Amino acid sequence: MVGGSAATLSSLLQEVSFALSDTLLSQYGNVGMSIAVSKDGEQAFLNLGQTGIGGIPPSNETVYLISSMTKPIVALSVFILVNDKRNNISISTPVSSILGQLKHNNTSFLHHANRELRLSDLLDLRSEFHKGTNLWESPNGDVPWQTVDQIMSFLCRMPSNKAFASEASFVNERNYVNECFCLAAAIIEKATNMPWARFVQDKIFESLGMKRTSVGIDEASRRKNPSAFASFHSCRVEATVAALRSATGSRTPSYTQIEEYVESSSFITPQPVEVNPSESSSYKTAETIKSSPLAAAAGIMSTTDDLLKFSSKLLQVYNSLPQGAASHHDEVERGMAALLKYIRALPDTYTYAAGWNRVLLPWDPTILDPKPRRPGADGDNVRRLQATMKERCRDKSTTTTDTRQSCQTAWPFFRDDDKLKSSGMAPNLALYHGGNMVGANSFWFLIPRQNVAVVVLCNTRGFFLDAANLACMVLADALFFGNTHHQMKTRLHDMIPRAKIIAPRVAANYLWELVKYEEKLSTMFPDEADNDTYAAACVGRYQFCEGIFATVSEGNEGVLVFQLYGKGFEYPLRVNKRTCSDGGHETDEDTLVMTFAMPMSELTPTGVGGSNRLDAEAFVVVFGGRDQKGMFGQFAWNFARVKGVDGSPPPEFVFKRVDD
């Protein structure tokens, strides 16, 4: 490394530690994190906080759930599979030719851009699948589907998402559907006749010496050596919200008041609480190495040390590509070479490929057509910052291009206006991915041509701040723009103040969404279900498709309890007696509008979080179809996150009564 060494990297990490540990950890409720960086083969590590509340400091070998950072690893396993010509599978093979169940049930979603869905489309998150985010994992980490057949049954009954029906619609977006990687895992099993998790373990983890990495962790191992694993945490927000209302004198303070509160001495730190791990990250016995297919999207456990081993090999292969195939000696290297060649061959506007987000650096945010993807634009950080800037722009009287550009340039990382204006800096391909699930968040950033890798693993799902994302951006930016210790330090000193500006804005936007969510919830559904009038008619078991069902039962004091897929968190149903399904008329005796949303103070201890779930209307169910006995025969629920092309609401998904 020019002008530097491992000591240089360690020095930079200490600068980040001193400057950001309070912001990223104690101020926003994160319990602990581990950071690893490498440049030109040199490595350094930093560990902050604790493995759990009252626990020990983490280390380079502490095992964390890496969540969606699982996808790049599973994508590599697919390329290893494809490279083995005995399998007679190519990256362009139609999915239905391998998974025949899809072809026979429903073919509407197997086509986009006038061609059939391919294996590569799964890895690129290019499909017409509707997002069923509120179904695939419960707030306390339970996963409903334990077999691929259940997942395919679900997908075959979902209408296709017409918003992603053309090639052009994918240029600047991903249709982020986790089930795509479940199907990729099923293809591995079909081709190899072995559990996909075993294939990944044998072909990748063992080959690269990733000794502490696995698809999930058996509970016996976790209990036997708890200090080796990071616990899972969420944050309580009751005290923070109460202090906000006290400081502003309003139950529904304005956005400006919330911003001022977050940046004031009155700000109350959200308190972390330990939660259960996601079921996708665990299995019952070590011998089977068999977990939910959804673990292929988000269930791998790893360490910063192991992920640098993976990163180092990938960077090495990238920089050996000009030398040809002779330089790639084993299955992993050849698989990585095939994956990287595939990514490099795609147009620059292609934003997600082979399990990685891809972007060109340095970033030029002034380009409006096509709109470039923000580097590191994964996780709640960017969504909340973008929403923050919209709120700020909304106060302005004009909507000029200059105003729109000022909102788009709020994300400062990987920007250098002077270098963008010069002609001497060639674009650099960067690959990155974030992970955000119950009790954990993580981030991974690679700049192959510069031999740069940054990995950040955190044991808390940040309600106010995706700490892993922000820490990773600060470090990756400094390593990208700096060739010497002095240059990296200078850039770091520029980015840290910007990060400290971003952090409270992200927190303010979260609180703003929370206040709006709870106000809307209390306005739309002021009363809990009236047991005497409605309970008997609602109680029962309802099914959407095989493996996806819900039960409605009577809880304490006459409250109705909604329980998705028969396990997991119990949501007390609340009823709105004043409106029916169209929201504008009195409810008649044949229709009942209810919600299983609840205040975040009740949801937080279970681990649910993120702006994805702060939508009171997303949890509304409409009971109907009463029979001669007065029992409701079904309920409809709009759980899909994506609206139609014309902005229309997503279609209703109907659960029908299936009482035994």
Image (tube, rainbow, N blue to C red):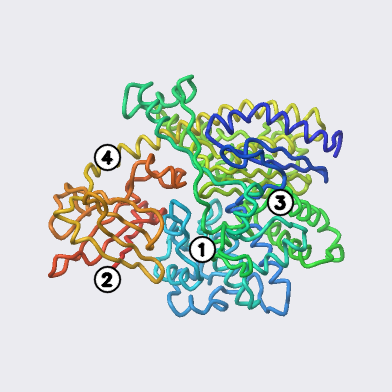
Return the residue at label 1.
Answer: 179
Circles 2 and 3, Cβ within 8 Å, touching? The answer is no
Residue type at mark 2 is: Asp
* Circle 1 SS class: helix
Residue 174, percent across and down?
53, 54
Residue type at mark 4 is: Ser
Of the image marks 2 and 3, the number of the one nearer the N terminus: 3
Residue at horizontal 62 percent and vertical 67 percent from the top: 289
Dot 1 alpha-carbon crowd within 10 angstroms: few under 14, some 14 to 19, many 20 or more: many
Give the foreground label among 1 and 2: 2
Residue 550, percent across and down?
34, 62
Return the residue at label 2.
Answer: 659
Return the residue at label 4.
Answer: 522
Of the image marks 1 and 3, the number of the one nearer the N terminus: 1
Q: In the displayed structure, does residue 168 sit left or right of residue 419? A: left
Of the image marks 4 and 2, the number of the one nearer the N terminus: 4
* Circle 2 SS class: loop
Return the residue at label 3.
Answer: 307
* Circle 3 SS class: helix
Circles 4 and 3, Cβ within 8 Å, touching? The answer is no
* Circle 4 SS class: helix
Residue type at mark 1 is: Glu
Residue type at mark 3 is: Leu
Q: Looking at this view, name the residue that lies furthest to the front.
A: 224
Give the foreground label among 1 and 3: 3
Q: Can residue 401 be seen in this view?
A: no
Query: In the depicted view, which residue is nearer to us: 475 or 120?
Result: 475
Dot 3 alpha-carbon crowd within 10 angstroms: few under 14, some 14 to 19, many 20 or more: many
